[in-house]
Image (cartoon, rainbow, N blue to C red):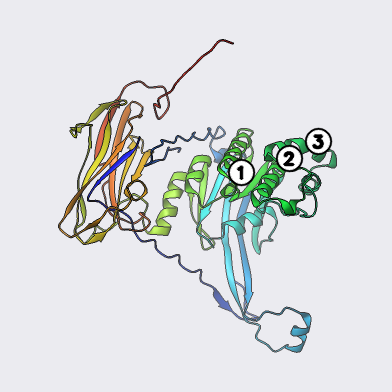
Amino acid sequence: MLKVILIGINHLPERRSFQQMGLAHRTEGAVPAVASVHVPLSTTVTTIEPAPAAPPGDPASRPSAISIEGVSKTFRLPHQQYSTLKERVLHPLRSTDYDELHAVKDVTLQIAQGEFFGIVGRNGSGKSTLLKCIAGIYSVDEGRLSIAGRLSPFIELGVGFNMDLTARDNVVINAIMLGLSRRQARARFDEVIAFAELEEFIDLKLKNYSSGMLVRLAFATAIQVDAEILLIDEVLAVGDASFQQKCFEEFFRLKREGKTIVFVSHDMYSVERFCTRAMLMERGDVLQVGDPREIGRAYHKLNFGHLPHEAPREPASTGTAIADAWFQNAAGERITSASQEDALSMCFEVRFGEDLHDPVFAATLRTELGHTIVVARSDQHGGTSDSFKAGESATATFAIPNWLTSSRYTLTPSLAREGTGEDALALVEDMASILVHGNTSGGILELPVDVRIEHK
């Protein structure tokens, strides 16, 4: 059981507002321009299976499935909207000025066959527009796109469904629209319904389906397409937890089969878990391409000025600092080693240089390789942390069940303002360490297991 003791504590920052995308004004006639395991503070320790290995070989050594060379896409936003031809004829001298929204700017990228490639960025960064250009939904204004293989977009699930028809009719029609033959669509009908878990609603009209049922049916139909390349835009953000897990398992299967997958998401954990490479976009430009973990950190830096649980570039001018950090046992003694299942607490002391109300205290436990195992936050597991005056000190203690496998672990303490907890006032990476010894099964946690084997 994970227990949090806050002896005068606080931690959490204010979220910074997103910048508005600028529009270049033009007039008519002008020239257009790791898997890590995240265990939040709670009474339950959750383990997440790491992603399977990527296809063998460096992506650069494999043939390209998607080749993007200097692609740009611009949308014109006219100042004066005409809804009918009559309006245009009656008012020929009205302003024809317009703004240009440069959604994608000179993007060049090679995605190898069998690669699980992630595209991340803030709202309005151009990632979904780029995906629609690859899918052929949008034509490109400049550049060249080459696709090697059959492509299936998971962008607008359920497009083409007729709400007045039953699931039986919609599955066949939608599968044919996605490229299957009539015979293939009918042969795979039972498989689609079984995956969507809608056997009891086959003959119910879609207008009577819930939104979750529609998503299930649309996804189950889309994955039947025999495509070499899949384009996925935030599909995993919908549906309940069990459906999302089925989606994950299906994508793992497709990845093992060597399919090429382009995955657009705001969920950095999913990007790090699934992708072999990733790309960060901002206002139509490509900022960085590389390792998913590094891209995830850059994405957080783009949003908050620095990474979550990373020290600010400039030291806090107020004098707020983390004075000490340590591990302790059940007797309250400081320790540098512990046996598995021994009581274990992560502790640190903060000295306040300014008045703070309900700051957020956080303790991050990581392996020697830098993989995050536990992220414990006072606002999520201890409620409010009280108010503190400049000159005061506070000690935070986070008690966790010691189900860690044999290895060395480090403690990174941090303190942030009340709010989201992303903008740290003080942080010291790997300030304390502990060696856990005991049995090793090969996993990252040694959870208590009750095994029963019975003859039948």
Provide the residue designation for mark 2: 200
Q: Vertical placement of 115 versus 279: above or below?
A: above
Q: Which residue is mark 1?
A: 261
In this view, the residue in front, 77 or 69, is 77
Crowding near the residue tagged with mark 3, few <14, some 14–19, many ≥20 C-alpha atoms within 10 Å? few
Please state the horizontal and vertical placement of residue 175, each as a whole percent of the image. 77, 45
First in sequence, mark 1 or 3: give its number. 3
Query: Considering the numbered disc 1 on the image, is that residue within a helix, a strand or a loop?
Result: strand
Residue 94 location (% of width, % of height): 68, 87
Q: Amino acid at mark 1?
A: Ile
Where disc 2 sits, the SS reads helix
Q: Is residue 88 visible?
A: yes
Viewport quadrant of the N terminus: top left
As drawn, which residue projects farthest toward the right?
A: 183
| Quarter of the figure that contains the C terminus | top right
Q: Considering only vertical position in the picture, is 198 above or below 23?
A: above
Quick check: marks 2 and 1 in contact, CB under 8 Å?
no
Classify 421 as above or below 48. Answer: below
Q: Which residue is at a point 44% across and 36% down the rendered structure image?
A: 46
Residue 378 location (% of width, % of height): 32, 48
Task: Kindly identify which numbered label has been placed on residue 187.
Answer: 3
